[in-house]
Amino acid sequence: MNVMTPPVSTPSLKEKGLDIILSDGSPHYFNYFWLRDNCPASFNADTRERSFDIFHLDAAPRAANAKIDGDALEIVWEGEDHVTRFPLSWLESYKEATPRPDPSDLPRQAWYSDHYPDVPRFSQPELMADPAARTRWIEAMLVKGFVILTDMPDSDAGLTETASLIGQVRPTFFGDYFDVRTHINPTNTAYTAAALELHTDTPAEEHAPGVQFLHCRVNSVQGGESLYADGVAVANDFRHRDPEGFKLLSEIAIPFYCEHDDYDMRSRQTVIELDQHGEVSGLTISQHMLDIIDLPQDLLDSYYPAFCRFGRMLQEDKYMMRFLMKAGECMVFDNHRIVHGRAAYSATSGDRYLRGCYTDRAEMRSTYRALVSEGRFKR
Ligand SMILES: [Fe+2]
């Protein structure tokens, strides 16, 4: 079979755009506003931002003429002293109106209760020294949502420098950092020795932080096993087991709150979060921060049982990874995907001290893209 190279043809000028034959041999339409706005000369090489101002063109952009010149489309604009050259390969990538390829858009891999030996582990000093190790770390976060860092410095600065590798430390209304140890007058169940049910953190925030760091500084108490489950694994199974329940929990937002003397944070979230592909990307769940659900009571006839079916499923042994954190380890996990909790411990049996902070998912993905791709503007 002969592979035919499409003949070079003159672009066909229309009223609001032009047709051009691309490598598939078919005509593809491009709008003049889009072509003019995205002229390579519209972008400043230093700021890497668009410097062209399409709002102040005298008239709607229109090609006076256009031709294929080598491997580029050349457009002379009507009423302007301006010529645009687009590499045909660049136009190819926009012919189908699909989103720009995103190297951080990796398929998630669900994990189950037996995952602990396979949890990706990274040595903190190695992460500090080696960008390739940082790339593998973020990749594991995007795919599995949970990693353990080892050899952490036993200092507050150790956590800060680690979190800063993937993004800015992201404050919540508790501040930049939080310390999990038993408090005399607790404002939060986490600060007692009681068991802590599986939850995602700060669900009452409009945009709950995306990545959580829990640095274990001391752990000599009896009990206090850490519990983690992959919300993607549970919700994907729920989708098959209980399609009606899945629909309710992924479409209807319910209220969460966090309230004390000086704050009254409120939000509405769906329990199951879907990404741009319709795939499960996370959860928002917290019984201790669930507000009084204010949906119509007859809707609650179906919503509440579905919510409870899902909540019970989340606690099935099949999903629950249990282990004891060791001093010098730092758990890093996707706070929207991984639910976490803790078994009760004896507060008098020793010391338990975790220091935590957050960064955001979007910034982690940004760091990943910068590590793995050349980008559009790198020189
Ligand atoms: Fe928590």
Image (tube, helix red, strand yellow):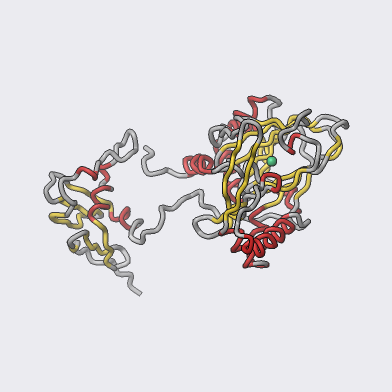
Residue 92: x %, y % from top left: 33, 58
Query: For this view, does 369 lie left or right of residue 67?
Result: right
Q: Nearer the viewer, residue 55 or 147?
A: 55
- Quadrant location of ligand 1? top right
Q: Nearer the viewer, residue 203 or 162?
A: 203
Residue 326: x %, y % from top left: 77, 36
Quarter assignment of residue 209: top right
Q: Nearer the viewer, residue 143 or 118?
A: 143
Q: Is residue 210 visible?
A: no
Q: Quadrant of the C terminus?
A: top left
**Residue at the extreme front of the image, as rendered:** 297
Residue 210: x %, y % from top left: 58, 43
Residue 132: x %, y % from top left: 56, 39
Query: Height in image: 182 above or below 373?
Result: above
Q: How many marks?
A: 0
Quarter assignment of residue 134: top right
**Residue at the extreme bottom of the image, as rendered:** 1
For the point 58% across and 57% down, the residue is: 280
Query: For this view, does 175 lie left or right of residue 287?
Result: left
Query: For this view, does 9 lie left or right of residue 102?
Result: left
Query: For this view, does 19 lie left or right of residue 272?
Result: left
Query: Height in image: 305 above or below 253?
Result: below
Q: Quadrant of the N terminus?
A: bottom left
For the point 34% across and 56% down, the residue is: 94
Q: Is residue 308 visible?
A: yes
